[in-house]
């Protein structure tokens, strides 16, 4: 072990302050992609999140819904809850007395072992909808049915129960055998909960992972109404006013609490990234990352880990993306897009691909250093809202982990305007990639976009004019080109992803005014500073001489207003551009 950590048991559990880390194997392997708790605790290095069990057992709610971004530990936590609480099933090879898995963890020792009374004390129903994302409702419903059949099969011992009637066993046999009717399938969760309660003479715990996965697929592929209707019937009967239920825990990315799915569940408590309760149970805290780095002997990589993967605010704590941290440490502290490469970026991609001018301007503002936009967050946003409410997209991006906020007060207030920001460097790169992808399409190809970038930094006005007029001709409508901001938005988007340059700056105060666009090189000694001023005139004033005169006026304004003030200028010097637009005509003048 490195400095600051000490062994606290013979079970391979280490602690630093209140934070615990378990490595029963002693091999310092990291559980990347491991969502099965017994496997994680026996074979990998595990950050102790076991006090989530105490949060649930001590809570006042019959049903808890935890909403966090993908890859933030939801499935692993649900597996942990199952293995702590469940009476071992004789039909489940993984089920056993799991006391050895929890010895040394916080839940086992908390309050003088009080929670051990709840260990292996409940029958548990656990289902995951991760694989229920078909292109049609028929495919998705079939996958849901397969999961129901598998979970019923895990409790096949009920067919031999002396506590159940022959009719009840016959109904359960149809569920196990996959021959149940649609009516029986809609009631299957209620049936299984009730039968387990009867057999064990103990109330049943229900755990449902990624409940919203089929809802998102339904919204995307056109069977939204069907999937919402089924889930409402399936969940409500089991989770509402059911004396056979001990409690339920659901996880997902989206809250969807306004949906008809949960309209009858007034016993549901929703915990999102704005909530203070259980805020440290998902994601890694600073102390947990420090302990993990200490244990692995990679503390020198902490500063880069913070820059790339920290930055989330959950309730009252700051959090790292756990998936990215594990991959970063596993890759010898080489920063990369680990979370972004796990797919599931559709929400962000759809936003950038379809964004209009005002939304693009907000995206550009977010991409600025310390960029912030002020928007209300409604964590109960529903998928149909995306096409109707302008602010719905920001709430979706927040829930999905592409935005965060430091203002977590009044978490259930959908109208409270909050400062939203991009959490860290990794997520910023995802935005940049989507912006570049959109404008690469507008430019016609990656090569053509690079050609435009080269024209900007070499002062090639003829090429720049030709490229911009082609892009306007192929992609823009005259009805959209009625003000200078439309051209500004287009050109700014085209300038993201320029080799050797930072993201473009826009409308910043400098000298005696505000420049339109500035491109700062990563190395001023090798590449010039670029300042761009734009002008627009009416459609009727599109004579070349008029546009060139306007471009000259824009170029002169850069010098007159000292727009290069405050920028770092090195040996490579500066480039100034005056660009004038009229409809789909362009004039550009450059001065080095």
Image (cartoon, rainbow, N blue to C red):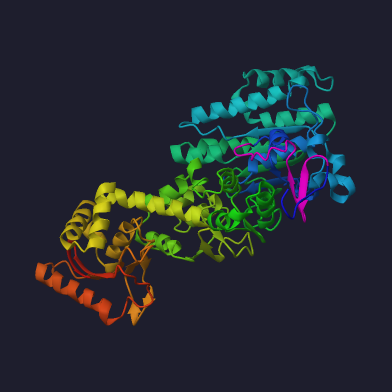
> Is 23 a magenta residue?
yes
Q: Residue at x 77, y 26 (%)?
A: 89
Residue positioned 37% across, 67% down in the render: 505
The number of numbered badges drawn on the structure is 0
Quarter location, residue 590: bottom left
Quarter residue 165 falls in:
top right
The secondary structure that dominates the magenta segment is: loop
Report whether 1 appears left or right of 425: right
Q: Is residue 545 above or below residue 307?
A: below
Q: Please state which of residues 580 and 220 is positioned toward the viewer in this rendering.
A: 580
Question: Where's residue 294, x and y in %?
Answer: 68, 51
Q: Is residue 184 visible?
A: no
Q: Position of residue 548 (x, y in %)?
A: 14, 70
Q: Quadrant of residue 498?
A: bottom left
Question: Residue at position x 52%, y 30% from top?
Answer: 140
Q: From the viewer's perspective, is residue 420 above or below residue 9? A: below
Q: In this orientation, does residue 471 appear?
A: yes
Magenta residues span: 10-34
User: Residue 303 at x, y = what percent?
Assistant: 58, 58
> Is residue 150 located in the magenta-colored stretch of the structure?
no
Residue occupying the point 25% across, 61% down: 456
- Compared with 182, 554 (above or below) is below
Q: Is residue 470 left or right of residue 320?
A: left
Considering every residue shown, the one lying at the far right of the view is: 112
Residue 453 point in image, percent of width and height: 27, 57
Taking the image as shown, residue 260 lies to the left or right of residue 592, namely: right
Query: Which of the image's four quarters has the C terminus?
Result: bottom left
């Amino acid at each position: 072990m490195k400095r600051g950590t000490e062994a606290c048991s013979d079970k391979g559990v280490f602690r630093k302050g209140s934070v615990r880390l378990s490595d029963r194997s002693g091999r310092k392997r990291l559980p990347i992609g491991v969502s099965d708790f017994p496997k994680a605790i026996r074979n990998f290095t595990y950050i102790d999140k076991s006090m989530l069990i105490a949060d649930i057992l001590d809570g006042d709610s019959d049903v808890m819904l935890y909403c966090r971004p993908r890859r933030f530990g939801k499935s692993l936590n649900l597996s942990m809850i199952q293995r702590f609480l469940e009476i071992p099933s004789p039909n489940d090879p993984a089920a056993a007395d799991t006391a050895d898995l929890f010895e040394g963890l916080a839940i086992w020792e908390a309050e003088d072992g009080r929670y051990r009374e709840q260990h292996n004390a409940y029958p548990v129903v656990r289902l995951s909808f991760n694989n229920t994302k078909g292109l049609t409702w028929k495919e998705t419903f079939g996958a849901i049915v397969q999961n129901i059949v598998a979970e019923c099969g895990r409790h096949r011992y009920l067919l031999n129960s002396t506590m159940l009637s022959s009719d009840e066993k016959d109904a359960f046999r149809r569920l196990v055998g996959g021959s149940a009717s649609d009516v029986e399938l809609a009631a299957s969760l209620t049936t299984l909960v009730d039968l387990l309660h009867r057999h064990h003479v103990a109330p049943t715990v229900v755990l449902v992972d990624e409940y919203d996965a089929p809802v998102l697929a339904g919204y995307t592929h056109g069977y939204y109404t069907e999937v919402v209707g089924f889930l409402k019937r399936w969940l409500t009967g089991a989770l509402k006013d059911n004396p056979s239920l001990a409690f339920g825990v659901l996880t997902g990315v989206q809250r969807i609490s306004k949906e008809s799915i949960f309209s009858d569940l007034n016993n549901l408590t929703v915990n999102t990234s704005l909530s203070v309760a259980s805020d440290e149970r998902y994601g890694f805290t600073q102390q947990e990352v420090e302990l993990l780095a200490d244990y692995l002997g990679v503390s020198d990589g902490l500063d880069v880990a913070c820059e790339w993967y920290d930055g989330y605010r959950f309730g009252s704590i700051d959090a790292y993306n756990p998936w990215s941290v594990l991959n970063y440490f596993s890759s010898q502290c080489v920063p990369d897009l680990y979370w972004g490469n796990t797919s599931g970026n559709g929400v962000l991609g759809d936003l950038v691909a379809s964004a209009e001018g005002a939304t693009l301007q907000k995206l550009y503002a977010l991409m600025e250093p310390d960029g912030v936009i002020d928007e209300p967050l409604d964590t109960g946003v529903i998928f149909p809202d995306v096409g109707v409410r302008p602010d719905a997209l920001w709430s979706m991006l927040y829930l999905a982990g592409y935005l965060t906020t430091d203002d977590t007060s009044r978490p259930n207030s959908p109208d409270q305007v909050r400062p939203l920001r991009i959490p860290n460097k990794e997520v910023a790169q995802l935005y940049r990639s989507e912006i570049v992808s959109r404008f690469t399409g507008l430019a016609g190809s990656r090569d053509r976009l690079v050609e435009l970038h080269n024209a900007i930094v070499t002062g090639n006005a003829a090429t720049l004019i030709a490229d911009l007029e082609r892009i306007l001709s192929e992609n823009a409508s005259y009805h959209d080109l009625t003000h200078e901001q439309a051209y500004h938005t287009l050109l700014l988007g085209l300038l993201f992803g320029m080799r050797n340059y930072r993201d473009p700056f826009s409308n910043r105060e400098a000298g005696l005014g505000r420049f339109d666009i500035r491109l700062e090189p990563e190395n001023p000694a090798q590449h010039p500073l670029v300042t761009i001023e734009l002008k627009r005139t009416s459609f009727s004033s599109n004579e070349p001489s008029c546009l060139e005169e306007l471009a000259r006026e824009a170029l002169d304004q850069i010098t007159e207003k000292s727009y290069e003030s405050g920028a770092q200028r090195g040996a490579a010097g500066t480039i100034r551009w005056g660009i004038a637009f009229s409809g789909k005509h362009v004039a550009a003048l450059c001065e080095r």
